[in-house]
Image: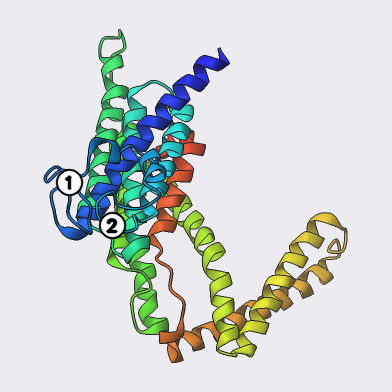
Amino acid sequence: MLFYLLLILFFVFCIGTVIGSFLNVVILRAFSGESIVLPPSKCPKCGNKLKWWHNIPIISYILLRGKCYFCHEKISIQYPIVEFITGLVFVAVFLKFGLQIDTLFAFAIAALLIVISVTDIKERVVFDMHTYSLILVGLVYNLYATAAQIIPQIDTIVGFHITTQWCLTNPVTNSLLGLILGVIIMEIAARIGYLIAGERAFGEGDTYIAAGLGAVFGWSNIILIIIMAIVLQLIFTLPLFLRKLAVNKDWKTLITLLMFFIYAVGFFAADKLTHLFDSLAVHFVCMIILFILGIAACLFVVKGLKTNKDNLTYLPFGPALAIAGLILLVTNANLLLGLGIFR
């Protein structure tokens, strides 16, 4: 039984790598403006048409030693990485959903999120065609999910009855509310950047990504996805930001931030592991200190944003949103739409 499962997963992985190879074409031709169908695959450097064995996912890159067969220019490492990641994601999706129609929708959602992540990381560009496609897939899936709720009940004795509660909680309503809420949250957050640094905190593409994720996962889960994305962004951005402060010799901000994080970690660890904070007075005093350090750190960071914008290290927020969506897709499918629609 285990052998057959591993064989199926290997087959799914191979299909995923083939799709990943196609996603590389989608990514490359989004930048060049060419059709994803014609012309056939070619070397982006010399323009020669690739032979069939040049297009075997991952294997061709290894056999060609990362160089074009014709002009011997280096092939971007992006190609095997996207193929490998897509294969792994497809395996994770299959393990979560199994053999059902929902799996096809999940594959499409995962593929679009991978494309969006790569274009944003590669050139800090989010293409409308990709985010609009994500929104469309989310809406179409939820139309299907709504139909799946209604049709089985039509032939029953009781029949299907439209109630106020159903109108407010059905997949299509949840999807539309998620789309709207994703736009509202990201646009509010983006415009806060004008108050802090005189420019948007996030690009318009991030708003479209949030709209697409809201259309897929519903209004309740878009909030969770944005929170997860913020955490992921902090994990990747904070070390670079601290390094930039050290390079710029902004010791005041650097020391204050480090004190805040060290104190916060120590505070919560001590609160969980010891009885140090059983005293309400001690707990209150420690919370006040944490609050003061946090406010001081925020003030220094905001001041730095206003006076030294050009020296900041920037990482796009779109990939964090997309990765958060992928995490939710393959780990907590029962949370989708807050109704367990992905069965």
Q: Which residue is mark 1?
A: 49
Rendered residue at 29%/41% (across/down): 54
Q: Which residue is mark 2?
A: 208
Left/right placement of residue 90 relative to residue 39 reads right
Task: Tell me which corner region of the image, top left, top right, bottom left or bottom right, holds residue 191.
Answer: bottom left
Rendered residue at 71%/68% (across/down): 264
Q: Nearer the viewer, residue 82 or 197?
A: 82
Contact, CB < 8 Å: mark 1 with mark 2? Answer: no
Rendered residue at 20%/52% (across/down): 129
The numbered dot on residue 267 is: none
Residue extending farthest to the top is 157
The percent coordinates of residue 227 (x first, y second) are 49, 57
Closer to the chain start, of discs 1 and 2, is 1
| Label 1 vs label 2, nearer the camera | 1
The percent coordinates of residue 332 (x first, y second) are 50, 37
The percent coordinates of residue 225 (x first, y second) are 45, 51
The percent coordinates of residue 105 (x first, y second) are 32, 33
Quadrant that contains the C terminus? top left
Residue type (three-letter) at the residue carrying disc 2 = Tyr
Task: Tell me which corner region of the image, top left, top right, bottom left or bottom right, holds residue 164.
Answer: top left
